[in-house]
Amino acid sequence: MDMSASAPVRETPAALRQRIEAEPLPVNYGHHLDAVATAHGSELAWITIDGDGPDLTYRQVADMAAKAANAFAAMGVRKGNHVGVMLPNGPGFLVAWLGLARVGAVLVPVNPKLTVHELEHVLADGDVTVLLAASECVEALKATSTGAPLVTSGKIAIVGAAPTGLSDWEAMLKAAPTAFVEREPVGLDDPISILYTSGSTGKPKGCILTHRYWLTLGKVKAALLPPCRRILSELPFYYMSPYYRFSTASFQAAAICVPPAPSLSKFYERIAQHDIDVVWIGDPLATLQLSDAERRHKLKHVSLYGLKKELHRPLEERLGVPVREAFGMTEIGAGLYMPIGDDAMTGSGSCGIPAPFRECVVADEDGNPLPAGATGELLISGPGLFNGYYKNPEATKTAFWGTWFRTGDLARIDERGYFYIVGRIKEMIKRSAENIAAQEVESVIYMLPQILEAAVIGVPDEKRGEEVKACIVLQPGLSPADLAPETVLEHCRTRLAAFKLPRYIQYYSSLPKTASEKIAKKQIPTDTERAISPVFDMA
């Protein structure tokens, strides 16, 4: 099997793009897994870290996926059925997804921590007809109008101690044959999963993702990385991250290294202890100091998504490996990437150039392409985008201009073709006749070392429509006395035009977050209990 890892890392972006787009994709995800297991069956695919779970080779994963496919088929699951999986982080979640992919069924991952109200929405909106759940989730499922009938009708298999009358998943797997015979043909454009985006406004929307989506994403991400053996995958399987990291790893016959849960304090320890090659790092991790033991890591590459540009160079110098920004979304997969050879662009604030299989433009409010230097909405097109929002045709229609997906991000492109994200359209503050990108103001505030988190929002104003408010969380141990609002304003004054300056500044103990740990700006005005200071009017 021709693995992307065999390609030279420093080939030109144009040559890499041409090569990747010319290579055919596998018939479907199941065929891809079989091919990897045949060619690299003894290579590890899953490594359990900080836990008691097993390490699994690609051959073992493929065999377990075939057993899972047969077990699901024995429950009556057929191509196109939607199956909810509600399990803690572990290989069982991955194997269930791969087994459903073999059948042609659709995975609907369910967060075990959801409230009954949230659980009701995912099960009902996702049209879940069969469930695989941990035993501790049964009572919550019984409390929902959608889950209860599945429990009483036996359309549920249990991992752990199965209550009387419910199927024991482990026993079903043990009894299932290893060989799986495809009953119905499964194609690249058949759905394989519905992932619910975290809803900072309104209820989460289900993104329909196909075999083509995951295979394209895995193939592209693997080609953009240096050859690697171990990829850290900390987030639970009800998020997008583990699926694309496994898909990426599979195209290099590498392993994902999976702990029970993410840990800020153990992050660099895990990297050093388990010889991790590739990681993804966000703001809090970028400023953590490394111990002597942690400095003896074997990292080859660090991927970033939205890390403040001021942190890029210091992080690269501390770790001694390439640190590269990128841009992606659940709806599009890989959108932009910074080539490994572009050392001079580190810290520039750019997310790079279009990834293979992707075309990107910056457009005005009518969808017309804008010239270099102008700010507009980032639009992305290409094969393997999501297939729309499940049961939400209006949201799907709004998300596209023809074949172009509207990211909702404000961006600009420079003369060399490099893209820069400057904010979110929905977070654009309209002050009098001026448009102010909240992210631009936030990036200036984040330059202050006393800042842990900052969110800039628009607040209603009778004269100007909106005014700029900066919501600030200070580093642990600091209080507003250590960073006066006047100091924040003067700092901004040297770097921002007068109309962009915060009119109001307020300090908070923390900021509300979405399920994926993004700041939930819409909740800030009503979440008054977090405020630790009055609102300072800087007029």
Image (spheres, helix red, strand yellow):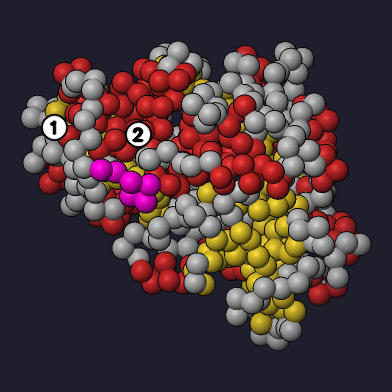
Task: Tell me if residue 287 comes above or below residue 454 in the rendering.
Answer: above
| Residue tagged 1 | 74
Q: Is 419 one of the magenta-colored residues?
A: no
Q: Is 186 one of the magenta-colored residues?
A: yes
Task: Tell me if residue 170 comes above or below residue 216 in the rendering.
Answer: above
Q: Is residue 74 left or right of residue 467?
A: left
Q: Is residue 330 left or right of residue 155?
A: right
Camera-near label (2 vs 1) is: 2
Real-space CA distance between mark 2 and mark 1, rounded to the nearest whole angstrom: 18 Å
Residue 2 in the image, given as x and y percentages of width and height: 53, 29
Q: Residue at x 75, y 62 (%)?
A: 413
Segment colored magenta? 185-191
Q: Residue 67's quadrant in the figure?
A: top left
Q: Amino acid at mark 2?
A: Gly
Q: Residue 28's quadrant in the figure?
A: top left
Q: Is residue 281 left or right of residue 66?
A: right
Residue 62 in the image, given as x and y percentages of width and height: 35, 24
Q: Residue 133's quadrant in the figure?
A: top left
**Quadrant containing the C terminus in the rendered view:** bottom right
| Residue tagged 2 | 30
Tell me the SS state at disc 1.
Answer: helix
Q: 347 or 44, which lies in front? A: 44
Residue 313 in the image, given as x and y percentages of width and height: 83, 38
Task: Tell me if residue 531 comes above or below residue 373 in the rendering.
Answer: above
Tell me the SS state at disc 2.
Answer: helix
Tag 1: Cα neighbours inside 10 Å, few (<14), some, or many (≥20)? few
Residue lying furthest bottom = 463
Q: Residue at x 21, y 25 (%)?
A: 169
Tag 2: Cα neighbours inside 10 Å, few (<14), some, or many (≥20)? many
Could one spot residue 133 in this view of the protein?
no
